[in-house]
Amino acid sequence: METGKLQLIPTPPTDRDDNIRWRTELIEHAATSGDFQNLVMTMCREDICGWFDGFVWTYDPRQDISPRPMILYPYQRDVVLDLQAAIRGGEDRLIEKSRDMGATWLVIGVFVHFWTFIADTPFLISSRVEDLVDRRGDPDCLMWKADYLVEGLPAWMRPAYSRTFMHLSNRANGSVIDGAAANQVGRGGRRKAIMLDEAAQMVRGIDASTADCTPCRIFVSTPHGVGNEFAEIRRAGTATVITLHWTKHPVKAAGKRRLPDGKWTSPWYEYECSRRASPRDIAQELDIDYLASGDMFFDLNVLSRIQSDDVRPPALRGNLRVERDGQRRPKKIEFAEQPNGPLRLWLHLDDEHRPPVVHNYAVGCDVSNGLGASNSVASIVDVHTGEKVGEYATAERAPEDFAEFVDALGRWFGGQIGRAYVAWEANGPGLVFGKRLLGLGYGYVHWQQQEESQSPKRSRIPGWHSNRNSKELILGEYRAALAKREFVNHSAEAIREATEYIYYPSGGIGPSQLVEETGAARQTHGDRVIADAVVNRARVEQPKARPPEKVVSPWSFAGRRQEYERKRKRERGVRA
């Protein structure tokens, strides 16, 4: 079609009532004219913002009418055109937003436009868990929004399509929109673009798992602290950032004014603040404030100092090679150096290729189910120096198998006592771990005590048992030890995981990506922070190694003095 003919179609008006009348008249006219339908289809293919303004409907039960025409605000037009260019050019985008700025609808709308008009274009949309991606009849789901946009198109514009679970296919041109939970995204094949919704709350690894799947990733989220990949991508500058602050919305920004501290306010903003329970909620949902939104448990300044001063690559990496007897007890333990081995050491081995025996060691463990979703971790500390000298992490070992490894690890880190002192979180998979460890005859372990007592007594229940109070107490001890440099942590991964620890709105403390999980799900999640906190407790309970006695010449003054003291004791009948 010639451009001149496209101008025969008037621009959709921005007033809502006028826009609805315009849509009704245009659709009625197109229903009687195939030529006019073709003209409109050409216009929509070439003008994505005109397509939004004239043919896209959205759903919002809070509004006085629903469906409602999606008439783009100026800031939304900029976003739509930028996303279109990013998809065509193969560039990443990161959308940081205040709540309710239309970002999710905009991204899905752009995908639906390509799906409708551009052949053989595959897209993927994802969120934290499957139920947020596709659950039929749920307007909060991403695929439901795509369905809504497609079904709202005029019949002559809507292509023949098929819809199955997590799959929307344009049968006329071969384009598809698929859905996937975050932990499945990397298996989705090649895509024109991928949308990652609420990316700040996704599990780690999403950046790496999607990099080879598509040239265009669109990360969308409100902030959720600084210890997540969304915040790290934002800081790294690897994606072009689109900021959708509430001050860009003409309704929300009506009557806005700047406060003395530099922040903006408006009647809408003040009303929204009055409805929210905490400053963290305001920082997350309204202010795009990464630091305040996280409600971090650990002090960011302390963690930054540790990253600068203490974190360093391990001196050795490898694994233990263990020969066992018929009862699976170690007969021979050797360290095998490997470039990418799971056992990382921040010390040098002695002449016998073992950790130096002049010090004693403690091992703290956090145990997962070993099904690949999270790590079982063993953290090793030199109790004499307070330094973390070793770390082992695996996502593939069952609790019983991990116990056998820790049994060998504790014997290898024997120190002067001959065995390292072992403590572990005994909840969940830790129960199985502890039973197996004790069954191997490893008895030099932490026994449960009454945490809140002024003079806690030991029980005969092995391991450290976690509840809300005991967890906050042991994590608080670890936080204080880091701040005072009583615990020196060289592990970059461990400190990075500490940045993710937040206070949950429902109570408790843990990684930000588990904020929506149940208590049972959290118990099956192993990580370095808990292992470090447990070994910090264990290093206090494990006695330091005695310094070696100095060899004194019997002919020196000190030697003669020692002989004189021994002689006096013998004369008094005291055994020397």
Image (tube, rainbow, N blue to C red):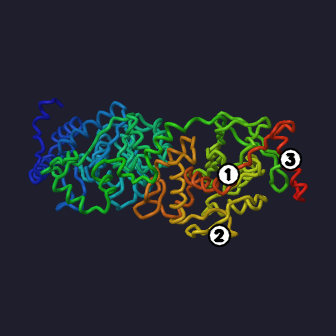
Rounded to the nearest whole Å, what is the CA distance between mark 1 and mark 3? 40 Å
Q: Secondary structure at mark 2?
A: loop
Q: Which residue is mark 1?
A: 362
Q: Which residue is mark 3?
A: 564
Rounded to the nearest whole Å, what is the CA distance between mark 1 and mark 2? 21 Å
Q: Amino acid at mark 1?
A: Ala
Could you tell me how many numbered marks the image carries? 3
Callouts 1 and 2 close, C-beta under 8 Å: no
Label 3 crowd bin: few (<14), some (14–19), many (20+), radius 10 Å: few
Please state which of residues 576 and 8 is positioned toward the viewer in this rendering: 576
Q: Amino acid at mark 2?
A: Lys
The answer to which image quadrant residue 448 occupies is bottom right
Please state which of residues 13 and 276 is positioned toward the viewer in this rendering: 276
Q: Which residue is mark 2?
A: 457
Image location of residue 104, percent across then percent down = 31, 49
Q: Which mark is residue 508?
A: none
